[in-house]
Image (spheres, rainbow, N blue to C red):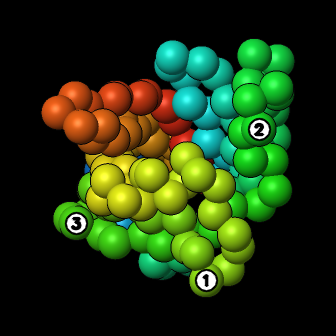
Amino acid sequence: MKYTFMKKLSFITFVLLGFLSFSQEMDCNDFKNGSYKAIMTEPIKIEWQIIRNGNEQIEKIIKLPDELKDLNYPTDPQYVTIEWISDCSYKTLYDETKSELTEGQKVINGMGGIITEITNIDGNCYDYRTIMKVGETEQIRNGRMCKE
């Protein structure tokens, strides 16, 4: 009787370890579609709701800091096109065919858009770094996106 119990326990342990060792971790490709909450953490905290479908994205501000409220920061949904550079990096440009662009968005598009690199994946979230060239300098912002 003990031998049968131990044999069953060994088999169950083997199966569970097999599932755990082969469980799929998310990779960058898992973030190309879906609904997300994004938080830029520096230099100022801004929260967005993002809906992404391959090469298209809609961004809507959830929480805008007081210091940006008087600067005509766009609060209407923003339409963005995505060009995937690699599995873990992409370039975004504002889509002028779907909404009228602000002067700031026109400048960003004119400078080649914003490059985003996925720097770390943690469960259903990823940390990112955006790079935007302004003349000879680069503006770097960090944040986190989580799949909802």
Q: Residue furthest toward the bottom? A: 97
Give x and y (percent) for residue 100: 69, 69
Q: Residue at x 43, y 51 (%)?
A: 108
Q: Quadrant of residue 83?
A: bottom left
Residue 41 showing in the rendered view: yes
Judging depth in this view, the residue of 7 and 102 nearest the camera is 102
Mark 3 touches mark 1? (CB < 8 Å): no
Q: Which residue position holds label 3?
A: 85
N-term-proximal mark, 3 vs 2: 2
Q: Which residue position holds label 1?
A: 97
Q: Which residue position holds label 2?
A: 72
Position of 41 compared to 109: left or right?
A: right
Mark 3 touches mark 2? (CB < 8 Å): no
Q: Quadrant of residue 51?
A: bottom right
Cα distance, mark 3 to mark 1?
A: 22 Å
Mark 1 touches mark 2? (CB < 8 Å): no
Amino acid type at mark 2 = Asn
Cα distance, mark 1 to mark 2?
A: 21 Å
Position of 119 compared to 75: left or right?
A: left
Q: Residue at x 67, y 80 (%)?
A: 98
Position of 120 compared to 144: left or right?
A: left
Give x and y (percent) for residue 85: 22, 66
N-term-proximal mark, 1 vs 2: 2
Amino acid type at mark 3 = Ile
